[in-house]
Image (spheres, grey):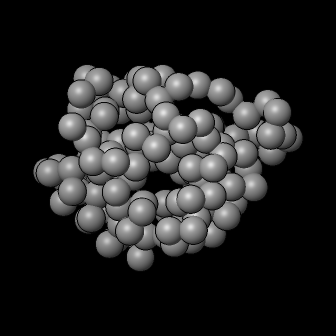
């Protein structure tokens, strides 16, 4: 999937009025995901994303990060961080998160999604389900 397709698809799935809103959502969700997964998984996932999108995933993680010091937080905190980054209410942050994750699943291999899920606690499976 190309950059423009990814952004347009998030805009469509989330029902957003502008590509700027979609891009803000993509950045918030991927930056938060990048904080929660180890850099090896970040790199593998980023390799399947278009330029201009993949950078959001790896931008916030220090290079010296190890599996034992990856930030550990819950799905609820994931939504809170997305909300803080986008300045949206929690319900909107949840909707945007699910829209971005849906498009992410369309853009990368199912094996990569499974690798990410194996790197996260079971509750994070909810991120990859439809909101509601």
Quarter of the rendering occupied by the N terminus: bottom left
Please state the horizontal and vertical placement of residue 116, each as a whole percent of the image: 60, 53
Taking depth in this image into account, of 44 and 26 the one nearest to the observer is 44
Toward the viewer: 67 or 21?
Answer: 67
- x and y percent of residue 103 in the render? 35, 61
Residue 23 visible to the viewer: no
Note whether 113 is above or below 132 in the view shown.
below
Residue situated in front as seen by the camera: 51 or 75: 75
Q: Is residue 39 left or right of residue 10?
A: right
x and y, in percent, of residue 25 in the image: 35, 44
Instruction: Please name the residue shown 24% across and 27% down the image.
Output: 91
Is residue 126 at all visible to an observer of this figure? yes
Residue at position x 24%, y 32% from top?
92
Q: Quadrant of residue 28?
A: top left
Using residue 95 as the reference point, say whether residue 26 is left or right of it: right
Give percent across and percent down for residue 86: 35, 32
Residue drawn at x 68%, y 55% as measured from the top left: 41
**Which residue of the protein is positioned furthest toward the bottom in this rendering?**
1
Relative vertical location of residue 45 with respect to residue 96 in this rendering, above or below:
below
The residue positioned 80% from the left and 40% from the top of the image is 67
Does residue 105 sit above or below 70 in this rendering? below
Q: Total marks drawn?
A: 0
Task: Give the quarter of the figure containing the C terminus.
Answer: top left
Asked if residue 60 lies left or right of residue 107, the reply is: right
């Amino acid at each position: 999937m190309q950059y423009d397709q990814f952004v347009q698809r998030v805009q469509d799935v989330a029902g957003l009025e502008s590509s700027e809103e979609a891009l803000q959502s993509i950045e918030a969700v991927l930056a938060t995901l990048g904080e929660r997964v180890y850099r090896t998984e970040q790199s593998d996932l980023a390799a399947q994303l278009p330029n201009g999108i993949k950078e959001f995933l790896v931008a916030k993680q220090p290079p010296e990060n190890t599996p034992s010091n990856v930030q550990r937080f819950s799905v609820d905190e994931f939504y809170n961080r997305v909300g803080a980054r986008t300045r949206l209410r929690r319900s909107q942050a949840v909707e945007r998160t699910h829209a971005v994750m849906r498009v992410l699943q369309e853009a990368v291999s199912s094996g990569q999604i499974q690798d990410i899920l194996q790197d996260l606690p079971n509750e994070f499976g909810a991120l990859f389900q439809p909101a509601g």
